Amino acid sequence: MAYDLILRGGRVVDPSQKLDGVRDVAFANGKVAAVGASLAAGPQTQVRDVTGYIVTPGLIDLHTHVYWGGTSLGIDADEFCRTSGVTTSVDTGSAGPGNFLGFRKHVIERSEARILAYLHVSFAGIYGFSKNTMVGESEEIRLLAPRECAEIADANRDMIVGVKVRVGRHSSGTQGWAALKMALEVAEEVGMPLMAHIDHPPPSYEDVIGLLRGGDILTHAFRPFPNSPADGQGKVKRAVREARERGVIFDIGHGMGSFAFKTARAMLAGGFPPDTISSDVHQLCINGPAFDQVTTMSKFLCMGMELGDVIAASTLNAGMALKRPEYGSLKPGSLGDATILSVARGKFDYVDVVGEHLEGDRKIVAEGTVLKGKWFHSADAARFPAQGGRA
């Protein structure tokens, strides 16, 4: 087979194949073509030397807000991809059934980086979330639109991967969990998973996970008190363990208010790592405390998770949560996405949403991305010298 691109000599870490070793990765026709030693380049093959770097499947950020220009939260997905190594941004409820088609036409279809979406059960999605305006969209029950949500989700299954709802004092207010129950009905109707946001009670953490089904996702899973998954003695709550046993997926969703080192330490000490690591990056946290996906990953690396497990939580596990196993893998035939990483050593300051600082000794750095079988950005490619084939 003639390859379009070969990444030569990197340390390939691909949890989907239980692979951690020096290999070449080849791409052809927008897909992964081969992983092996000393893959042969043809006269038209672009070869990039990534010796000394880590090559992973393209990182998936399972919780982002990338409806740029359509909501006050939105960031630019392509710029986020280039600087953070994320090849698939999953937008979580920025748009609802009333404005999803605009999101699709004006952002998703024009973006080079991949964008998938959870569709909000609220008609206009997260429409009032900024520094100066905070409107809990799930509190306005007149705007909840289950029928329209089901129709739009069913008609856009190529890009919509599930239903999103936000519940808690800040997002559903006096309506409690009414929006959650409505969103669950929609998810059941269209046969998709639900992603539930949780903030301050009510409803409680236990109330929310008690309603979630296997395959549904609780995001902001390691949030601080109140509504923490750990009790006052730092023990993982029984209801949390029971939810995982029946298949509920626990996602980080760092964001501006939803991740605490204290909670994470308790959960990791209790043998309860996250299923997926995501940044919940948006306009109000991209300059801190979340910053981006690799910074969120770095926090878990510095708290004791193994590098392979951190990568799995941002590739294999995220792809499985999306029910798209071709995402988050370098198996031949999978999406032609890869992320080139390095792990810097030194002293690095990390901060959580309550202001606690952690001095870490390592930092995961995004060095470059391959998207749809091609090097995504020429400025990044310049750091990796071309060998043979075509430059």
Image: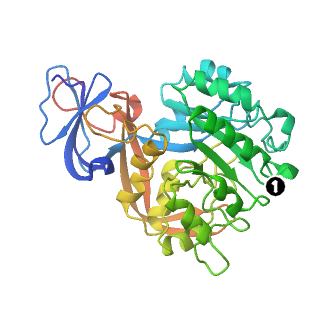
Q: Position of residue 249 (x, y in %)?
A: 53, 53
Q: Is residue 294 visible?
A: yes
Q: Amino acid at mark 1?
A: Arg
| Viewer-nearest residue: 143 or 252 | 143
| Viewer-nearest residue: 320 or 113 | 320
Label 1: how many Cα within 10 Å (few below 14, some 14–19, many 20+): many
User: In which quadrant of the rendered view does residue 357 lie?
Assistant: bottom right
Query: Which residue is drawn at the image coordinates 68% and 66% (left, top)?
Result: 224
Query: Which residue is drawn at the image coordinates 61% and 28% (left, top)?
Result: 153
Please determine whether, in this image, residue 231 is positioned above or below residue 149. Answer: below
Q: Circle 1 is placed at which residue position?
A: 169
| Viewer-nearest residue: 296 or 365 | 296
Question: How many dots with numbers?
Answer: 1
Please determine whether, in this image, residue 73 is positioned above or below residue 211. Answer: above
Query: Which residue is drawn at the image coordinates 29% and 38% (left, top)?
Result: 384
**Would residue 229 appear left or right of 247 to someone viewing this image?**
right
| Viewer-nearest residue: 121 or 346 | 121
Please determine whether, in this image, residue 267 is positioned above or below residue 89. Answer: below
- Position of the N terminus, as image quadrant, is top left
Q: Position of residue 366 (x, y in %)?
A: 42, 46
What SS does tag 1 mark?
loop
Q: Position of residue 143 (x, y in %)?
A: 82, 33
**Would residue 258 appear left or right of 250 to someone viewing this image?**
right
Q: Residue furthest bottom?
A: 233
Q: Is residue 70 visible?
A: no
Q: Position of residue 287 (x, y in %)?
A: 64, 48
- Position of the C terminus, as image quadrant, is top left
